[in-house]
Image (cartoon, rainbow, N blue to C red):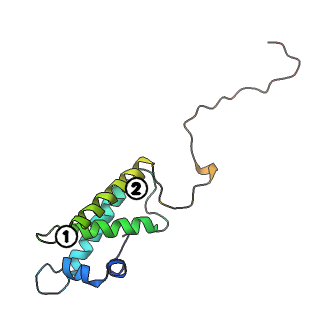
Amino acid sequence: MYATAADIDATYGTELLDLLADTAGDGVRDEAAIGRALDDAGAVIDGYVSARHALPLPAVPPLLRSLAMDLAIHRLALRPGNMTDEIEARAKEARKTLEAIGAGRSGLGLPAASPAAQSSNAPVLIAPAKRFGEIW
């Protein structure tokens, strides 16, 4: 999981989840709905990130935490009357960022792999060393 309900509360205030996760209309958050939305956001992120990075990641980059929050909020806002232009725009931007990460046009902010760990598809020429004085 890339983000938690506490992350959303700390970033956007408790009122947002109180409103979006009140699935019964009784003024009480549906914690299970929040968990499902966060899990769904994590699955979307994994789909893009796994194209370039081994999962699980060693740590949750702040960028992915932010994207997970935006995607989870969007998921919760799909109920009639909850969607706003801002929520829609943030989710669209999150998906664009994830597409860029998956395509290798954007990074996660993780430390770069050591050069020895990186692979190249470049051809390698192996030949005996040239001896001075030989005429070809």
Disc assigned to residue 68: none
Q: Position of residue 38 (x, y in %)?
A: 29, 70
Image quadrant occupied by the N terminus: bottom left
Q: Are marks 1 and 2 in contact (CB under 8 Å)?
A: no
Q: CA distance from mark 1 to mark 2?
A: 24 Å
Residue appearing at x 30%, y 63% in the figure: 90
Q: Is residue 61 above or below residue 16?
A: above
Q: Residue furthest right?
A: 133
Depth check, mark 1 against mark 2: the one in front is 1
Q: Amino acid at mark 1?
A: Ala
Residue appearing at x 26%, y 66% in the figure: 86
Q: Residue furthest bottom?
A: 27
Disc assigned to residue 77: 1
Q: Secondary structure at mark 1?
A: loop
Q: Is residue 111 left or right of residue 21?
A: right
Q: Is residue 103 above or below residue 30?
A: above
Q: Position of residue 54 (x, y in %)?
A: 46, 56
Residue holding disc 2: 49
Q: Secondary structure at mark 2?
A: helix
Q: Is residue 92 left or right of residue 116?
A: left
Q: Amino acid at mark 2?
A: Val
Residue appearing at x 40%, y 65% in the figure: 64
Q: Is residue 12 left or right of residue 121?
A: left
Quadrant assignment, res 44: bottom left
Q: Is residue 77 left or right of residue 128?
A: left
Q: Position of residue 24 (x, y in %)?
A: 11, 81
